[in-house]
Amino acid sequence: YDEIYVKEKIFSIEVCNSLQSAIENNKLSVLYQPKIRIPDKKIVSAEILLRFDDLILGSVPPATFIPIAERSGQISKIGAWVLDKAVLFLKQNTPCSNEKFSLSVNVSALQLNDRNFLDIAKSYAESLGDAIDFIELEITESSFLNDIDESVLILNELKSFGYRISLDDFGTGYSSFFHLSRIPLDIIKIDRSLIFNIDNSPSLRSLVRNIIRMAKDLNIEVVAEGIETENQLRILEDLGCQYIQGYIFSKPVSDKELIDMIKLQPFKQRMHDSNK
Ligand code: C2E
Ligand code: MG
Ligand code: MG
């Protein structure tokens, strides 16, 4: 037998079990990472990111536990809980900013194909009324590789409830132009893998410039993910990018910290700069 395989299997069973008790005992938490509009450096939105801290396993990153939760089916409960968090936050805090403020929620491929998720999304939409277009659902291209027609139907249904649709991790995976022409997108998030070496690579700059140009033509908003340095920010600004999300402005923070940041905006100073 393969020892590494067995170890991984045991680890994933352990994660699955502790995740189960975290779900039952309401021990999962979320952080919020601000998205900033480049020209005026204002926070216009934030992405909700799951956190799972276990007494024995320590802090398990979402990149590790989300795939496990997808395989076990736990993602349905977790996903509904995260959406609930977003709705609550908007109901309680919309007045703290006198401008439109939105939240984005990551939605896994499995949730999109789950009728139950669509029903939950619909009832939240009804409870939020006109404020529902303040929620962006982030999906990845792997969500609609199998049956594009079915995916288009589902996304149109979610849009008809009032949600905005965002394509996460753009530039990794398939990034098919065919998808872009069919999927009813409001937002594209350019993946960090296209950004982190952008200073040294004219070809990456050209690629990103043309993604931005194309998105604008299609009337789709562009967010660049994972901006860490002043230089990357300047380049993205020069390339005409509208929104950024990254450590240069803020790491994911608690709800209270986010609200304080919104009150203090626009940003006058960098909060983090990993080059220092
Ligand atoms: P994502 O949706 O692409 O989220 C962005 C990730 O990049 C987050 O990692 C964020 O903390 C990180 N990040 C943001 N700015 C920077 C930066 O400047 N530099 C670097 N190095 N990283 C940055 P996180 O929180 O570990 O989440 C990882 C992934 O887990 C997410 O990628 C998303 O795919 C998934 N995920 C997180 N929360 C949820 C959730 O509620 N539901 C689902 N289905 N997936 C989730
Ligand atoms: Mg995301
Ligand atoms: Mg992403």
Image: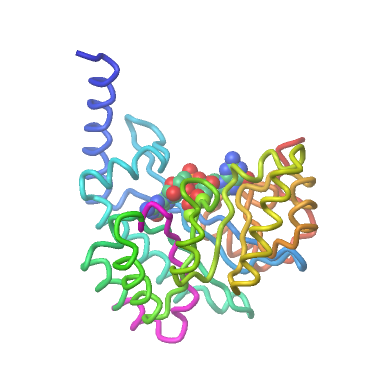
Q: Residue at x 73, y 42 (%)?
A: 273
Q: Residue at x 40, y 70 (%)?
A: 88
* Quarter of the image where the N terminus is located: top left
Query: Please, which residue is most extreme toward the bottom here?
Result: 130
Asked if residue 174 is positioned above or below residue 103 in the image, the reply reads above
Whether residue 13 sits left or right of residue 163 in the image: it is left
Choose between 271 and 106: the one closer to the eye.
106
**Start and end of the magenta stretch?**
123-144
Q: Is residue 103 magenta?
A: no
Q: Residue at x 21, y 67 (%)?
A: 116
Choose between 96 and 74: the one closer to the eye.
74
Q: Residue at x 24, y 31 (%)?
A: 14
The reply to whether residue 213 is in sight is yes
Q: Position of residue 53 (x, y in %)?
A: 38, 40
Asked if residue 66 is positioned above or below residue 275 in the image, the reply reads below
Asked if residue 233 is positioned above or below residue 99 in the image, the reply reads above
Q: Name which quarter of the figure residue 41 lies in.
A: bottom right
Q: Name which quarter of the figure residue 16 lies in.
A: top left
